[in-house]
Image (cartoon, rainbow, N blue to C red):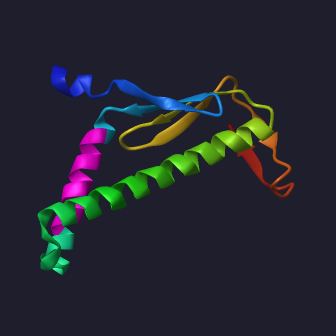
Amino acid sequence: MQGFNALRRQVVLGRVSGVPVRADYRWFFVIGIMTLLIAASTMQISGEIGFPGALAVGLSVTLIFFISIFIHEFAHAAIARTENLEVVEIVLHFALEFHRFLKSRVLQSRFCSQDFEIII
């Protein structure tokens, strides 16, 4: 069980616009599983590509997927900054992603209608 708890730790992937981006170690396990599943599916569809080619396709598709998740989370952080909230970090977890702000509050966004409130 201690080995599984070690996977809950986070690694710093870098900084984007001064905001640290961290990922849970379990993400790397999921990237590996997704890569292998997509590679296996690719080999069934096109057996001519071979295992190295299918692995390259699987890794490419998986990375594009995870990059899109990061872009989505970064967009949340960018909008929060436009609302004068201090973004502390962006954390990519195994089952959910989030961005942490210095303070939580309910605000009216200038990008949304008056009836819509963003809870941060």
Q: Quadrant of residue 35?
A: bottom left
Horizontal and vertical percent position of residue 52: 16, 61
How many numbered marks are there? 0
Q: Is residue 94 left or right of residue 22?
A: left
Q: Would you say residue 83 sits in the magenta stretch?
A: no
State the residue in front, 115 or 44.
44
Horizontal and vertical percent position of residue 89: 57, 28
Q: The C terminus lies in which quarter of the figure?
A: top right
Above/below status of 42 relative to 62: below
Q: The N terminus lies in which quarter of the figure?
A: top left
Q: Residue at x 64, y 47 (%)?
A: 75
Above/below status of 7 relative to 118: above
State the residue in front, 74 or 119.
74
Above/below status of 75 relative to 53: above
Q: Furthest-top residue in view?
A: 2
Q: Quadrant of residue 24?
A: top left
Q: Residue at x 72, y 44 (%)?
A: 79
Q: Which residues are magenta?
A: 28-40
State the residue in front, 40 or 98.
40
Q: Would you say residue 29 sits in the magenta stretch?
A: yes
Q: Quadrant of residue 17?
A: top right
Q: Is residue 71 left or right of residue 22?
A: right
Horizontal and vertical percent position of residue 51: 13, 64
Q: Residue at x 79, y 40 (%)?
A: 82
Query: Please, what is the dominant secondary structure of the magenta stretch?
Result: helix
Horizontal and vertical percent position of residue 111: 82, 54
